[in-house]
Image (tube, grey):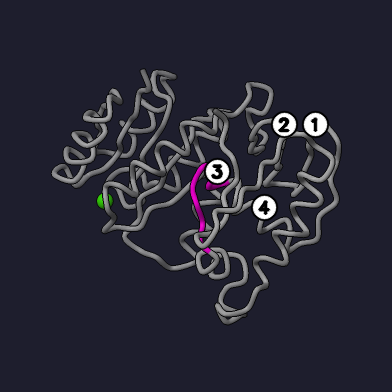
Amino acid sequence: MMRILIVEDEVKLARLIGQVLEEELFQVELASEGGQGLDMALSGNFDLLILDLMLPGMDGLQICRELRKEKCNIPVLMLTAKDAVPDRVDGLDAGADDYLTKPFAFEELLARVRALSRRKLLPEDVGNPILKVEDLEVNIETHRVRRGGKLIDLTAKEYFLLEYLIRNAGRVLSRDQIISKVWKYDYDTTSNVVDIYIHYLRNKIDGNFPTRLIQTLRGTGYSLRSNS
Ligand code: CA
């Protein structure tokens, strides 16, 4: 059974999240203070951490940095009341794996938790920020991408598209979502830039491999397979 630690000082919200997760048969424990949360996360007793950004004691960013410094590779879903881009960048720099902005729908929370729980890092990647789906490896530090151990050369845009897909492996992403995250609204949503770049990426990532990782959901969007 998957064990999840929730570090959140809004006790009501923490309990609600806990209930929702327990209904999905996750095992849940709560911490409401930063230092206590860090100690519990470092105990090795948990498979996933849901971490609020603003906490008494030690904030979410500090906790995240400390975990990564200690070579603890537990997947971290950060909760933040702010949706500003700098906060997201700070969190990613600190080693968070995904974000959710308050207020959020519990369905969305569950989807993120499921995606993160499927995306387990290999032991040899501890301290090395590599996201892995099947035999595809994306190093989010060096931006190096390998499939089946073979280095794949991507342009900057192709890389950011792939990083967005793999961070959300198993989720369907609409063209609008992809444009707003990867192109930052430089393009209007009627353009077919996403389809064009998916085509480039697919040639490089899936072209010479029997298993196709990038999937098209007609009329809906795209998805990167998740580890089954
Ligand atoms: Ca808080």
Disc marking residue 135: 2
Q: Which amino acid does label 2 sit on?
A: Asp
- Circle 2 residues within 10 Å: few <14, some 14–19, many ≥20: few
Q: What stretch is highlighted in magenta?
A: 167-174
- Which mark is first along the chain, 1 or 4? 1
Q: In this view, does 201 lie to the left or right of 2?
A: right
| Residue beneath the point at 21% across and 30% down | 23
Q: Are marks 2 and 1 in contact (CB under 8 Å)?
A: yes
Per the image, label 3 sits on a secondary structure element best described as loop
Residue 213 appears in which quarter of the rendering?
top right
| Residue beneath the point at 51% across and 62% down | 219
* In magenta stretch: residue 169: yes
**Is the distance from the Cβ of mark 2 to the nearest ligand 1 atom less than 8 Å?**
no
Please give the residue where the numbered disc 4 appears in the rendered image. 162
Q: What residue type is labelled 3?
A: Ala
- Which mark is first along the chain, 1 or 2? 2
Q: Is residue 43 left or right of residue 10?
A: right
Q: Do the residues labelled 1 and 3 touch (CB within 8 Å)?
A: no
Per the image, label 4 sits on a secondary structure element best described as helix
**Is the distance from the Cβ of mark 1 to the nearest ligand 1 atom less than 8 Å?**
no
- Which mark is first along the chain, 4 or 2? 2
Q: Which amino acid does label 4 sit on?
A: Leu
Q: How far apart are marks 2 and 1 (CA)?
A: 5 Å
| Residue beneath the point at 63% across and 21% down | 123
